[in-house]
Amino acid sequence: MPAGSSLPVTTTAPHAQALALADFIRREIPLARAMDLRLEHYDGDRLGLALPLAPNVNDKGCAFGGSLVSAMTLAGWALVELALRQRGEDCDVFVAESGVRYLQPVWNDFLAEARLADGAGWATFFDTLAARGKARIEVACEVPGTDGKPAAVLEARFVAKRRG
């Protein structure tokens, strides 16, 4: 997020908070606005961002790899940011490292979904944040493809650091 920008902590329902965060992302990140990113779903465990193909297309007519990785990174970031906001934590969240695999082309509008990686848990993350003022968590992201197989996957580590 741009320096000095922060999303106000709210006490609304989780989906309403996710909608507000999606609006914040579109407002503060020009790339997200150009990609026409929208919140598809959020249930506390999974977050999905929907994107139309048209502004994310490459010269072959399928989704641009940069759009796929950007959408998955933003979905992972938003999942962590929402967990922090719902607990009243005022933190900056950064992607510390990530790896992406492109498995099949995406020829239509697409979805980027994020969830905690296997073995990752919010309890450990928040305990570490309380003790140290910063914590990291592993997130798994995917763009679903055809026949139930992923088109792209991203494994990322996000770091949260308390502001101030």
Image: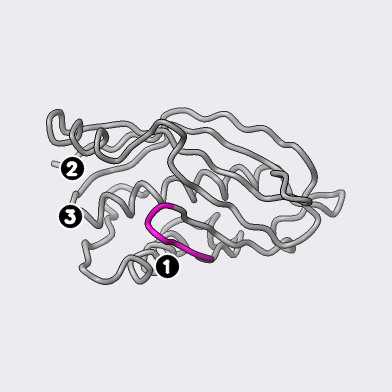
Q: Earlier in the sequence, mark 2 or mark 3?
A: 3
Dividing the picture into quadrants, the one containing residue 7 is: bottom left
User: Which region shows up in magenta?
Assistant: 39-45
Eye-nearest disc, 2 or 3: 3
Give the crowd class for mark 1: few <14, some 14-19, many >=20 residues within 10 Å: some
Amino acid type, callout 1? Asp
Residue at 21 percent of width and 61 percent of height = 9
Q: Can you give x and y, in whole percent of width and height, for residue 81 in the image?
A: 33, 50
Q: Nearer the viewer, residue 51 or 124?
A: 124
Q: Can you give x and y, in whole percent of width and height, for residue 142 in the image?
A: 60, 45
Q: Can you give x and y, in whole percent of width and height, for residue 29 in the image?
A: 46, 55
Residue at 69 percent of width and 44 percent of height = 150
The residue where tag 3 is placed is: 88
Amino acid type, callout 2? Arg
The residue where tag 2 is placed is: 163
The residue where tag 1 is placed is: 23
Classify residue 85 as left or right of residue 147: left
Q: Secondary structure at mark 1?
A: helix
Classify residue 60 as left or right of residue 87: right
